[in-house]
Image: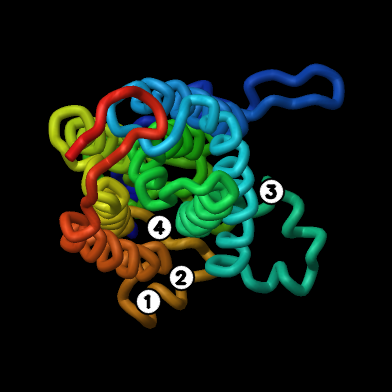
Amino acid sequence: MIYFIAAAAGHIRFEDLGLHPDVFSIGFFTLRWYSLAYIAGILIGWWMLLRMLDQPGAPMARRHADDLVFYATLGIILGGRLGYVTFYAPEMFLHPLRILRLWDGGMSFHGGAIGTMVGIILFARKNKLNWLRIHDYVACVVPFGLFFGRLANFVNGELWGKPANVPWAIVFPHTVPYGMIDPARHPSQLYEAALEGLLLLAVMSFAFWRTKARYDPGKLVGLFLVGYGCARFVVEFFREPDSQLRAFAEHTGLHMGQWLCVPMILGGAYLMATAAKRRVRVEPTWGTESVA
């Protein structure tokens, strides 16, 4: 640690970047970058979903997209928050009002993924649609939200990485107890934005637009689960564990985020391996072409 502290003097200091969690404030209203990241991810994902639904063999009509976004958004918010409380801060259950304070602690992607899945299943059952094929399409647009969300984490100066002396390390403020010198750290938020956002988006886009993966129910969502799980698992080695779970990480050898990725990777691999068996003649809900 002494080495990293000594090296911190030659690295970029986060406060010199001029970043602030708030976009602007008008009276009692404050727009935060984190909120804007959610809005941008949902709107751009919605736009991309509509483009995908114009392709042959779509699992639902464009008119279904509005309702789907509503169900998915509820799943993201409710699942993400409950997931954070369950996996990272179970003591909040003793103080239920704290659960409603979304800015207190944050959200969990794994919880949001479960919430979104439940939302898609309810939406599909209501409209008598194939939930797994809908999930394939939704999985292709999730990286937009991941990308913007991780950028917002960086702007907020939160979820920083472990001490490092790489040239691009950044000195984040208040990462150690008061009175100690903050070391330079990995900007792990940007690593996640690159892997979980840009790289995963490229992989999912290629699979959708350049292959016939979307006609094998479960293949695309399986690819997403494996891709996200592996990316998150790797980045966690460069990321500082949540303070309340540092003892858990030391005891188990892995962060909570890594343990939660294991069932994602296994489940995704299963969906990909068995996708071909679920393939049937696809009669589109929207469009004119059938796909054998």
Label 2 close to label 1 by CB (< 8 Å): yes
Q: Which residue is mark 2?
A: 246
Gap in angstroms between the C-alphas marked 1 and 3: 28 Å
Q: As drawn, which residue projects farthest toward the left?
A: 211
Q: CA distance from mark 2 to mark 3?
A: 22 Å
> To which quarter of the image does residue 12 belong?
top left
Mark 3 / mark 4, whichever is N-terminal? 3
Q: Amino acid at mark 3?
A: Leu
Circle 2: residue type: Arg
The numbered mark, 4 or 1, whose residue comes first in the sequence reads 4
Disc 1 packing (10 Å; few <14; some 14–19; many ≥20): few
Q: Secondary structure at mark 2?
A: helix
Cα distance, mark 2 to mark 1? Answer: 6 Å
Alpha-carbon span between mark 4 and mark 1? 12 Å
Residue that numbered label 1 is attached to? 250
Residue 127: give x, y in percent of width and height: 55, 44
Residue bearing the label numbered 4? 240
The location of residue 138, given as percent across then percent down, is: 40, 40
